[in-house]
Amino acid sequence: MSVSLYGSGQTVLQVVNATYGTTTSTSSSSFVDTGLSASITPQSTTSKILVITNISGVTKGNSNAQVAGQIVRGSTSILVFEDVALSSNTVQASGCMGASYLDSPSTTSSTTYKIQFSVPNSGGSVNINYNGNFTCYSTLTLLEISGS
């Protein structure tokens, strides 16, 4: 099945979706895995992969804890996003961050995308998929779009 993109001459060839709900924490200023990943095998080397992600979480700690995310293809960072302060001293703040990126992996081999996160200013900690007293879910969607 393919879906035509109106007016573009391109089609969506396949969709892969991953949902992840396990709480993951870090206070590292280096990127660490959230646990959210998905793999797709492009049908053509000219295909593009539209990566869409949404991460739920909560920061806690001191000095305006910041959170940053990144999309990684294989072991290569392809997009760093949302370096934002979400909390202040002893205050907990919840929120979501998301990103989309149109990638050109130029392969027909299985390709894995994953989401990582960090606390750039070392000002506290971040919990992914935990929002106060309940579990949240983060998502990663991969759409293969035919090449032009």
Image (cartoon, rainbow, N blue to C red):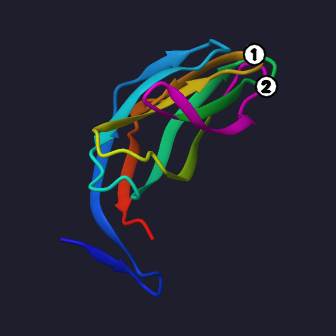
Residue at 36% in and 57% down: 143
- For this orientation, the residue located farthest to the left is 1
Q: Which residues are magenta?
A: 72-93
**Mark positioned earlier in the residue sequence (1 or 2):** 2
| Dominant SS type (magenta) | strand
> Judging from the image, what secondary structure is the residue with disc 1 in?
loop
Q: Nearer the viewer, residue 131 or 45?
A: 45
* Residue 131 visible in the displayed image: no
Residue 85 percent across, percent down from the top left: 75, 33
Q: Residues within 10 Å of mark 1 (few under 14, many from 20)?
A: many
Instruction: Decide: is 95 above or below 134.
Output: below
Query: From what the image shows, is residue 39 above or below residue 29?
Result: below
Residue 8 in view of the camera: yes
Mark count: 2
Query: Which residue in the structure is indicated by mark 1?
Result: 123
Residue 41 badge: none
Q: Tell me the amino acid under the disc marked 1.
A: Gly
Q: Amino acid at mark 2?
A: Asn
Residue at 28% across, 51% down = 16
| Closest to the observer, 109 or 25 | 109
Disc 2 element: loop
Taking 133 as reference, is 78 above or below it?
A: below
Name the mark on residue 64. 2
Q: Is residue 81 magenta?
A: yes
- Residue nearest the viewer, comparing 16 with 42: 42
- The image quadrant where one finds the C terminus is bottom left
Report the side of 3 relative to 36 (left or right). left
- Which of the 4 quarters of the picture holds residue 147? bottom left
- Label 1 with label 2: CB-CB less than 8 Å: yes
Q: Is residue 79 above or below residue 124?
A: below
Q: Position of residue 33 (x, y in %)?
A: 46, 22
| Residue drawn 67% across the image and 21% down it | 119
